[in-house]
Image (cartoon, grey):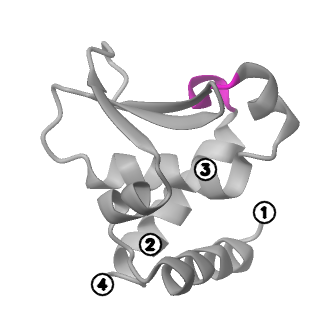
């Protein structure tokens, strides 16, 4: 996915939902945030019983970027066949994680509300 496509997706999200705040986006989309012991993993998301769930390490205090990153997976990769098969972002490839990082950066800087 190109940088322009990611920028346009962020623009669409913020325009449609009226916010760039990751917590508000999760709330509006009924995405659950669970604080868990994840070892060295900061954050991951999965689909469980049709619901998108973001797991956040309870040992990290500033999680805004991690939430925005997982939202990047939600908006950019949830229709990806591999994601549907494994139902977890922990095993996605580096390309998907770079795209999710860019989504997070754009969401939190260009469309910060």
Q: Residue at x 68, y 25 (%)?
A: 87
Residue drawn at 58 percent across, 36 percent down: 51
Q: Nearer the viewer, mark 4 or mark 1?
A: 4
Name which of mark 1 and mark 3 comes first in the sequence. Answer: 1
Quick one: SS at disc 2? helix
Which circle's residue, 4 or 3, is located before the other in the chain? 3
Q: CA distance from mark 4 to mark 1?
A: 25 Å
Q: Which residue is mark 4?
A: 113
Q: Does residue 31 sit above or below 76 in this rendering? A: above
Q: Nearer the viewer, mark 1 or mark 2?
A: 2
- The image quadrant of residue 21 is bottom left
Q: SS of the residue at dot 3?
A: helix
Residues tagged 1 and 3 counted as in contact (Cβ below 8 A): no
**Total numbered badges shown on the rendered structure:** 4
The reply to whether the magenta stretch includes residue 88 is yes
Of the residues under marks 1 and 2, which one precedes in the sequence? 1
Q: Is residue 81 left or right of residue 31?
A: right
Please name the residue that numbered disc 2 is placed on. 107
The Cα atoms of the two marked residues, 2 and 4, are separated by: 9 Å
Mark 1: which secondary structure?
loop
Classify residue 83 as left or right of residue 71: right
Q: Give the alpha-carbon distance from disc 1 to disc 3, as whole Å.
A: 14 Å
Where does residue 33 sit, x and y in percent of width and height?
35, 38
Q: Is residue 18 depicted above or below 1 in this figure?
A: below
Give residue 1's mark: 1
The residue under label 3 is 74
Q: Position of residue 41 (x, y in %)?
A: 37, 23
Q: Per the image, is 78 magenta?
A: no
Q: Earlier in the sequence, mark 2 or mark 4?
A: 2
Quadrant where the C terminus is found in the figure: bottom left
């Amino acid at each position: 996915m190109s940088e322009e496509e990611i920028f346009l997706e962020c623009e669409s999200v913020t325009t449609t939902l009226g916010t760039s705040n990751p917590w508000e986006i999760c709330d509006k989309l009924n995405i659950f945030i669970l604080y868990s012991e994840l070892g060295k993993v900061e954050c991951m998301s999965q689909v469980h019983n049709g619901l998108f769930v973001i797991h956040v390490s309870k040992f990290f205090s500033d999680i805004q970027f991690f939430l925005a990153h997982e939202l990047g997976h939600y908006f950019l990769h949830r229709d990806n066949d591999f994601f549907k098969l494994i139902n977890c972002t922990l095993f996605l490839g580096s390309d998907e994680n770079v795209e999710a990082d860019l989504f997070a950066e754009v969401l939190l800087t260009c469309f910060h509300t």
